[in-house]
Structures are given as C-alpha cells and as structure tokens.
Amino acid sequence: MSLHHNRTRKPPYSTREALAHLSAADPQLADLIRRAGPFTLKLAANQSPFESLLESIIYQQLHGKAAAAIHARLIASFHPSGLSETHPTPQQILDCPNDQLRAAGLSANKALSVRDLAAKTLDGTVPTLARIRKMPDQDIITHLTQVRGIGEWTVQMFLIFRLGRPNVLPTNDYGVRKGFALTFPALSSKVLDPTAKVTPSDLPTPATMTARALPWHPFCSVATWYLWRACDLTKIDRNEV
C-alpha cells in the first residue's frame, strides 16, 4: 500500500539494523531482501491522525487515482476561491452539508465514516499526534477501530506508513499473505502458480504467519514491506519470461 503525500521522512528506526537482523534471523527472507533490493519506505511527514485516517477511509476499496481525485475534490470544496489547499478541520467536516461530501465523490457510507472520524477526533477517541506517538500499537488499534469504517487493517497501515512503527505484521492483508506464500511455499496449502488466480484458501493462515514471523521481531514492518515486494517480483519475473 502507498498513499500520496507532498512531504515524507525516513522511518524512526535504523533500517540498516532491521535488514541485518532479518537477514541473519531468516535465510529465506534474506533471499527475498537480496532480490528486492533497498528498503525505500517513506513516511508521511505532515499529517495529523485525523487527516491521515480521513485519507485512508477515502482510499478504501478504490483505485489509487480515483481515490486521489476524490480526496483532492473534498479538500478543494472547502476553498471555493481555489487559493488554499488547507485540510478541513474535524469541525468543518461535521458542519458541512452532506451534499458537499457526496459531490466530492464520497459514498453514503464513507460520508458517515468521515463524519464519525471527525466527531471522535473532537471528543478525544482519536488521539492527537503527540499523544498517539506515546501509545503502544495495540492501544492505538483499540482506540481507532472505534471509528466507523476503520478496522484493524486500516490502523495497521497507519502504524506502518504514518507513525513508522517497526513491528507490525498485517496477517489479513492479501498482498502480505500472497508474498508470504511465494517466499515460504512449504507453509502454504499448495505451491502457488504465479500465472493462476489465487484464492484466500490457497494462502497461509494468520496463525501460520504469526508463528513463522517470531524471529523477525522487532522488525516485522520491514519484513511486511518485503513481502509486498515479493508480489511485485513475481510480476517482473513473469514479464521477463
């Protein structure tokens, strides 16, 4: 997953230490790291939790370009003169008419979700950035999944891509599961054929992944990034045949 931001920063952990740890702990993962190349994850540097999660809600189940267009229209709708790109505040989202949200391209369900996000930001359910940075991962998941339309996967993406938490393993993410199956074929129900359609039943279970990933701690987020790359490598290899 990759969201689009104007400013980025490096993760707050040592990527060199992470790669050395993962490569030493797991030879099969080390081979994937070698084939995939440098770790290039960048974090959004200028978003509040409210802004980041609002964008995540918009991006859910949409192609990136379509979601980006909706996100841009929503922000622009609060600046009719076109002279500013300031992100709307939670109060502005609550106060705006529903027609404004729908005109930007939000579905009825997503409009309800962004309003709930705004309300829960104002009442403190969604912590400030300063507070959230001090919270353990599981506490953040517990808080943020109280918002309509935000599940554990969305929060895990927030932990990896916004907060730069080093030890997140989204075992229900399709791409991570497929990348795991490609990297560790002996742990899947069958060896994947990269040219065939893959169903969830062909992929390893979250329990299998969690157990196999124990040596990766405390850098599961870095391993996760490489499991996504495993899917990309399969596409490259197929195109070269």
Image (cartoon, grey):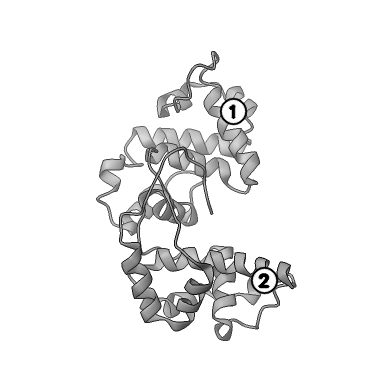
**Picture residue at 61% right of the left edge, 68% below the top:** 233
- Residues 75 and 36: in front is 36
- Please say if 70 is above or below 143: above
> Tag 2, which secondary structure?
helix
Q: Quadrant of the N terminus?
A: bottom right
Q: Percent from the top left, x then y, of residue 97?
A: 55, 21
- Work out whether residue 194 can be spotted: yes
* Image position of 199 (left or right of 165): right
- Whether residue 207 is visible here, answered yes or no, is no
Q: Position of residue 136 (x, y in %)?
A: 29, 57
Give residue 157's mark: none
**Residue 240 figure quarter:** bottom right
Which residue is disc 1 drawn over?
73
- Give the residue pinned by disc 2: 237
Q: CA distance from mark 2 to mark 1?
A: 38 Å
175 with respect to 140 (left or right) = right
Residue type at tag 2:
Asp
Tell me: residue 175, above or below residue 93: below
Residue 2 falls left or right of residue 50: right
Amino acid beneath label 1: Arg
Residue 95 x/y as whole percent: 47, 21
User: In which quadrant of the rendered image does the C terminus lie?
Assistant: bottom right
Whole-percent x, y for residue 23 in the image: 40, 77
- In the image, 100: left or right of 199? left
Residue at 56 percent of width and 34 percent of height:
71
**Mark 2 / mark 1, whichever is N-terminal:** 1
209 and 45: which is toward the camera: 45
Q: Does 113 sit above or below residue 33?
A: above
